């Protein structure tokens, strides 16, 4: 679910930039609007997974290998958030 939305976000931002460079503001506006929808979905999914990792999986991991796996997974999801967020939200995700 996250991979397809990340791909959609990258493609949509690319389309938005191309349309802006062509001077087609109408299509750029549509791309930006769709991009916003994808960002909301991505944030919702990432937050749900990060919550599950913090509340259940990391604390319940039985050995070091499992904990490392879940910590790496947590870092990946924070990276996904940092890819599309701006300002303070990006700083928080990057830390």
Image: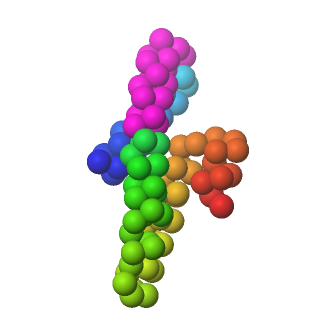
Find out whether residue 73 is within the magenta segment. Answer: no
Q: Give the magenta-colored segment's residue range.
A: 23-41
Q: Is residue 22 visible?
A: no
Q: Residue at x 49, y 25 (%)?
A: 32
The image shows residue 64 at horizontal and vertical percentages of 43, 87
Q: Is residue 58 visible?
A: yes
- Identity of the residue furthest to the bottom in this view: 64
Q: Is residue 75 left or right of residue 12?
A: right
Q: Is residue 5 left or right of residue 33?
A: left
The image shows residue 54 at horizontal and vertical percentages of 47, 63
Q: How is the image coloured?
A: rainbow
What is the tally of numbered marks visible in this picture?
0
Find out whether residue 29 is within the magenta segment. Answer: yes
The image shows residue 18 at horizontal and vertical percentages of 48, 29
The image shows residue 86 at horizontal and vertical percentages of 64, 41
Majority secondary structure in the magenta region: helix
Question: Which quadrant holds the C terminus?
Answer: bottom right
Q: Is residue 43 left or right of residue 82?
A: left
Q: Is residue 39 left or right of residue 86?
A: left
* Displayed quadrant of residue 65: bottom left
Name the residue nearer the viewer: 42 or 56: 56
Q: Residue at x 45, y 62 (%)?
A: 55
Q: Residue at x 29, y 48 (%)?
A: 1
Please say if 75 is above or below 65.
Answer: above
Q: Residue at x 55, y 25 (%)?
A: 21
Name the residue nearer the viewer: 4 or 52: 52
- Identity of the residue furthest to the top in this view: 26
Please say if 70 is above or below 14.
Answer: below
Name the residue nearer the viewer: 34 or 66: 66
């Amino acid at each position: 679910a996250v991979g397809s939305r990340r791909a959609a976000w990258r493609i949509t931002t690319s389309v938005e930039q191309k349309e802006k460079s062509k001077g087609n503001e109408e299509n750029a506006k549509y791309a930006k609007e769709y991009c916003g929808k994808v960002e909301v979905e991505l944030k919702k999914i990432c937050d749900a997974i990060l919550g599950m990792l913090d509340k259940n999986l990391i604390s319940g991991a039985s050995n070091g290998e499992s904990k490392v796996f879940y910590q790496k997974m947590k870092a990946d999801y924070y990276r996904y958030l940092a890819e599309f967020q701006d300002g303070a939200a990006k700083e928080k995700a990057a830390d």
